[in-house]
Image: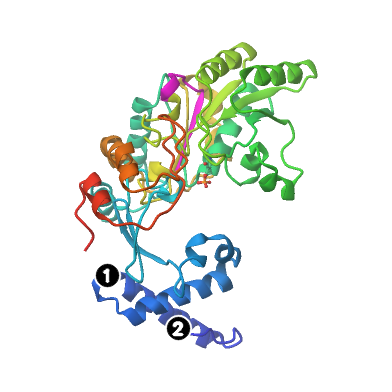
């Protein structure tokens, strides 16, 4: 492991940085089997040190994979389907799914193939010419999202999608307030954080956006009361934002009447309904979108995580056709440089349905002794833990070849 020379010697530092970069490129471009035990151990130790020195020590304290892994922290090195392998060659069944990014599994062959195809042409887009893939993906989303959803604007992270949806709601309604749910989670940039329903995340950064109210998830009467009270005091609400099934809060499924009533209440009070499907979208709960369980169409849908096929970061917010002139104002005030390539999402559609259902069949969960998983009902298939088990069951469920 190379120690950093003092920054004063800048030529030496640059040379060392070049060597460091070359060493890592060499390791990751080499076939995995060629990694020696010494190299594997060195990467693990070095990663722990780099996290402490150059990312954040906090990660080493709260990540179970670090504290429970004996001498060598679990340092992920490769993955396929439902299996992750660390540098030491230990295998783990991935039932955390990267908190939703790995909905189609790790390195799904069709997704990887399509991304490689795009990398060989134009990996990103120039931002000056028209790019066909982005336009095509918007069209696909329009076809697959419920109701009259017509457009798509792409960003990198879920929180950016939520920020975009908030801006659009303000433009469209001319109002500034929002209602979100207690324990709700919508991301950690300042706007999304204002919607957050947990004090642990919000409190250190108060004051956040004004005009945000919170009501209990699943309680339509309470929501209506909040809207009525806001109206009574002249506090204009632009939108209600909801996770169809709360993810971060612990996979909470609302009562069946909740979302249909929410839709009616929003119509009545002329506020928009934003569905944050960053966690529940793309087949995560067994339907394409979480809202599909209740056949409710939101005015704006936010997507992220699994939209990138577990391969690239991409997110989107997608409004109804009626958003018209408000929508046209969005490019002026919303970050427009998505790092993501749109193709993974295009490949994702044909594959995610069967994959997701196959992988998390209840019978398989039992077989693998994963009974400690919080599995609150057929609508919320959101696994929340990480086990070390054999690979056989997983690779067969996914029809992937076992990892070499
Ligand atoms: C429902 C929901 N919305 C938004 C986000 C934020 O997504 P990101 O971390 O990509 O910004 C998350 C992240 O977990 C989420 O669960």
Q: In which quarter of the view is residue 264 placed?
A: top right
Question: Would residue 22 be visible to someone looking at this image?
Answer: no
Q: Going 76% across and 23% down the picture, which residue do you hit?
A: 235
Answer left or right for 212 relative to 151: right
Q: Is residue 25 above or below residue 200?
A: below
Instruction: Where is residue 88? Give x, y as percent.
Output: 35, 71
Along the viewing direction, whichever of 251 and 148 lies nearer the viewer: 251
Q: Secondary structure at mark 1?
A: helix
Q: Work out which residue is located at the far top of the displayed protein and give it.
A: 268
Tell me the CA gap for discs 1 and 2: 20 Å
Q: Is residue 330 above or below residue 258?
A: below
Q: Is residue 404 above or below residue 294?
A: below
Q: In which quarter of the view is residue 21 placed?
A: bottom left
Q: Is residue 296 magenta?
A: yes
Q: In which quarter of the view is residue 168 placed?
A: top right
Instruction: Where is residue 102? Give x, y as percent.
Output: 38, 47
Instruction: Where is residue 297? Give x, y as percent.
Output: 46, 20
* Numbered label attached to residue 32: 1
Q: Which residue is mark 2?
A: 1
Q: Work out which residue is located at the far right of the displayed protein and give it.
A: 233
Task: Please tell me which of labels 1 and 2 falls first in the chain.
Answer: 2
């Amino acid at each position: 492991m190379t120690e950093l020379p003092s920054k004063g010697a800048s030529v030496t530092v640059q040379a060392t940085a070049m060597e460091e970069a070359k060493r890592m490129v060499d390791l990751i471009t080499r076939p995995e089997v060629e990694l020696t035990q010494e190299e594997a151990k060195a990467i693990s130790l070095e990663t722990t040190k780099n996290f402490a020195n150059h990312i954040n020590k906090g990660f080493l304290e709260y990540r179970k994979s670090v504290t429970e892994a004996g001498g060598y922290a679990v340092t992920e090195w490769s993955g396929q389907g439902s299996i992750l392998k660390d540098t030491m060659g230990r295998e783990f069944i991935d039932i955390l799914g990267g908190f939703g990014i790995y909905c189609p599994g790790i390195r799904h062959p069709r997704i990887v193939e399509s991304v490689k195809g795009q990398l060989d042409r134009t990996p990103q887009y120039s931002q000056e010419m028209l790019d066909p893939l982005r336009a095509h993906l918007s069209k696909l989303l329009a076809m697959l999202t419920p109701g009259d959803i017509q457009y798509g604007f792409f960003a990198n992270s879920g929180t950016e999608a939520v920020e975009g949806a908030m801006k659009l709601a303000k433009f469209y309604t001319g109002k500034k307030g929002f209602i979100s749910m207690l324990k709700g989670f919508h991301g950690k940039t300042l706007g999304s954080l204002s919607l957050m329903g947990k004090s642990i995340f919000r409190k250190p950064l108060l004051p956040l956006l004004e005009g945000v109210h919170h009501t209990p998830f699943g309680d339509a009467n309470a929501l209506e009361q909040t809207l009525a009270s806001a109206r009574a005091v002249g506090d204009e609400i632009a939108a209600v934002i909801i996770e169809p099934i709360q993810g971060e809060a612990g996979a909470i499924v609302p009562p069946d009447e909740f979302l249909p009533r929410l839709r009616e209440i929003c119509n009545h009070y002329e506020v928009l309904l934003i569905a944050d499907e960053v966690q529940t979208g793309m087949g995560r709960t067994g339907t394409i979108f979480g809202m599909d369980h209740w056949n409710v169409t939101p005015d704006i849908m936010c997507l992220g995580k699994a939209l990138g096929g577990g391969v690239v970061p991409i997110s989107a917010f997608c409004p109804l056709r009626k958003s018209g002139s408000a929508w046209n104002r969005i490019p002026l005030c919303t970050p427009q440089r998505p790092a993501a390539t749109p193709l993974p999402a295009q490949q994702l559609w044909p594959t995610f349905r069967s994959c997701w259902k196959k992988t998390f069949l209840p019978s398989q969960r039992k077989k693998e002794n994963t009974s400690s998983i919080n599995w609150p009902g057929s609508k919320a298939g959101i696994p929340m833990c990480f086990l070390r088990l054999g690979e056989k069951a997983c690779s067969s469920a996914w029809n992937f070849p076992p990892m070499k």
